Image (cartoon, rainbow, N blue to C red):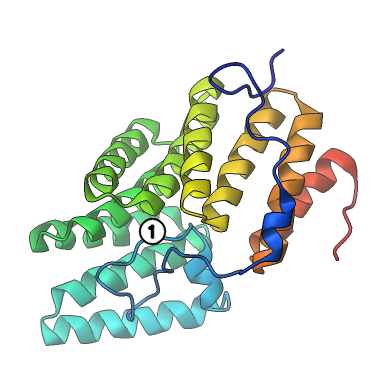
Amino acid sequence: MICAPGEDGSMTTLGADTRRYTGDRRSPSPSWRCITRSANSTPAGPTESITKLDRNYPAATQALEQALSLYHDLGDRRGQANALTDLGVVRRATDDHRGAILALEQALDLSRDLGNRLCQANALAYVGAERQQTGDYPGAAQALEQALAIFRDLGDRSGEAVTLNETGTLHRVSGDLAQARRCHQQALDLARAITSLSNEAHALAGLGRCAITAGCTMQAQALLRQVHQIFQYVGAADADTIRAELNALTGPQPTG
């Protein structure tokens, strides 16, 4: 069995220079936050906005619902769209996938009415990810394709990388490992081009999970160790998830 080859059959994702992770930890892609998010911001990754809320989901939900009510009273439809998008992200973090889809689709409708294509793309990417979680693979593919087209049209390479990683996950759970690897490899190349450690880590994680599915344990370990190193370096909570996946493959990993 060939384990996660590149387009030319080579192992393009291994042997990364980990010395790159000893420099500036700041990501050049803006993190998108609830309420204070700027018009030009794009998602830095599926979980980063929640990390910035200290993972206090009840408090986040309460704050966002209050903000949504205020925006409604003020007639601020753009504020409503932003709050609904963030509410969807909070709900997905608590595994309320159907509630997340409801909020995100409302945000999508508002963004379309407002003609805000970036907000549309953000909402579509998350809708796609959530539809995949509920088993609606055709709906997920449709939403992700639309998001990817908008991000590319806008020249938003960070959003493109995020969406490619989500699309790779969709292909993997659908059983198309070859297409999943292609998507994650494209995301990896984009992430390294724009020096986005978060997107790079998610792409490597996707490739690692493809390797696990294919039964390529050694390659999966190598990839997930790189991911764990990056997440530890940037202080991402996702490091715990990756450590658990590594533990399942190799036994307990050092926490330092």
Which secondary structure lies at badge 1?
A: helix
The quadrant in which the C terminus is found is bottom right
Q: Position of residue 56 (x, y in %)?
A: 56, 78
Residue 163's quadrant in the figure? top left
Task: Using the image as rendered, state which of residue 12 and residue 161 is in the foreground.
Answer: 12
Rendered view: 122 above or below 237 = above
Task: Using the image as rendered, state which of residue 73 and residue 16 is in the foreground.
Answer: 16
The quadrant in which the N terminus is found is top right
**Residue drawn 55% across the image and 70% down it:** 26
Q: Please name the residue that numbered disc 1 is placed on.
A: 100
Q: Is residue 216 left or right of residue 66?
A: right
Q: Is residue 83 left or right of residue 115?
A: right
**Residue drawn 69% across the image and 21% down it:** 3
Q: Residues within 10 Å of mark 1 (few under 14, many from 20)?
A: many
From this viewpoint, which residue is outermost toward the top? 1
Task: Using the image as rendered, state which of residue 80 and residue 198 is in the foreground.
Answer: 198
Q: Position of residue 105 (x, y in %)?
A: 26, 55
Say what amino acid the circle numbered 1 marks. Answer: Ala
Q: Is residue 244 left or right of residue 60?
A: right
Q: Position of residue 113 (x, y in %)?
A: 9, 60
